[in-house]
Amino acid sequence: MNFFNQIPEIKLSCTGDISAITAAVAEKLSASESSHDLDHTIRVMHNAELLLAHTPGVDADIVRLSALLHDIARPEEDAGKGSCCHAELGAALSFDILRSAAVPHPVAAAVSRAIACHRFRRGAVPDFIEAQILYDADKLDSLGAVGLGRAFLFAGHCNARLHNTEAEALSSEPYSKEDTAFREYLVKLRHVPEKMFTAEGKKIAVSRLQFMETFFSTLDSEING
Ligand SMILES: [Fe+2]
Ligand SMILES: [Fe+2]
């Protein structure tokens, strides 16, 4: 299956107009920045499927709808330069979208709760399995080849250098010339596996991180010989 540009089809076990929900997401995310655009949502949906396949006893409707809707309020957070939290606003917007599309109240409420805690660093702890799968699926998109691509996209956005030393990276400020992809890796990404909730999520995270380690060591040797 090709996951580029096309939202994967979701077959719900519960009632609900999935085409209306999908259309609402596509419309909202057309205004998102590239690191949290519709492609990111589609990749998170794909990651969620990888985790769902290895985690028994999970409500797949809640996981799939959460992944689809999780960043729906990113455009508002980006436009407000972080003054609103996209997880909190996204939780409220998602609930309304789901209820308007005739998704049962308990499912809409659970999706909303999962989205409210999907960033965790600044919010509530994901304390039920569907929310934990969403959290892990979202985090996996910051690792591996995709994670490298996103880190360089962001560094380009900040007009940062292509690469720097560990000392330069670790002594620098966010959004500075030294806020390189390597800095993102050193400060945040290499710690992601220890924050994963699911066993499968952790396993995939460790393997994607190994790829990043190899990449940065190759980059270093190409530059420094
Ligand atoms: Fe998010
Ligand atoms: Fe996300």
Image (spheres, grey):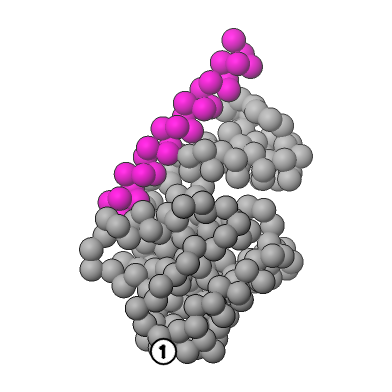
| Magenta-span inclusion, residue 160 | no
Residue positioned most to the left: 56
- Where residue 120 appears, x then y in whole percent? 46, 63
Q: Which residue occupies 63% across, 59% down?
A: 37
- Where residue 182 appears, x then y in whole percent? 58, 33
Name the dominant secondary structure of the magenta segment. helix
Q: Is residue 159 left or right of residue 6?
A: right
Q: Which residue occupies 37% across, 86% down?
A: 106
- Where residue 92 appears, x then y in whole percent? 55, 81
Q: Is residue 113 above or below residue 197?
A: below
**Displayed quadrant of residue 170:** top right
Q: Name the residue type under label 1.
A: His
| Magenta-span inclusion, residue 215 | yes
| Secondary structure category for the residue under label 1 | helix
Label 1 Cα neighbours within 10 Å, binned few <14 / some 14-19 / many ≥20: few
Q: Is residue 205 left or right of residue 185?
A: left
Task: Give the magenta range.
Answer: 197-225
According to the image, label 1 marks what residue? 105
Q: Is residue 184 left or right of residue 176?
A: left
Res 146 visible:
yes
Q: Is mark 1 within 8 Å of ligand 1?
A: no
Foreground of the two, 189 or 43: 43
Q: Which residue occupies 46% across, 78% down?
A: 112
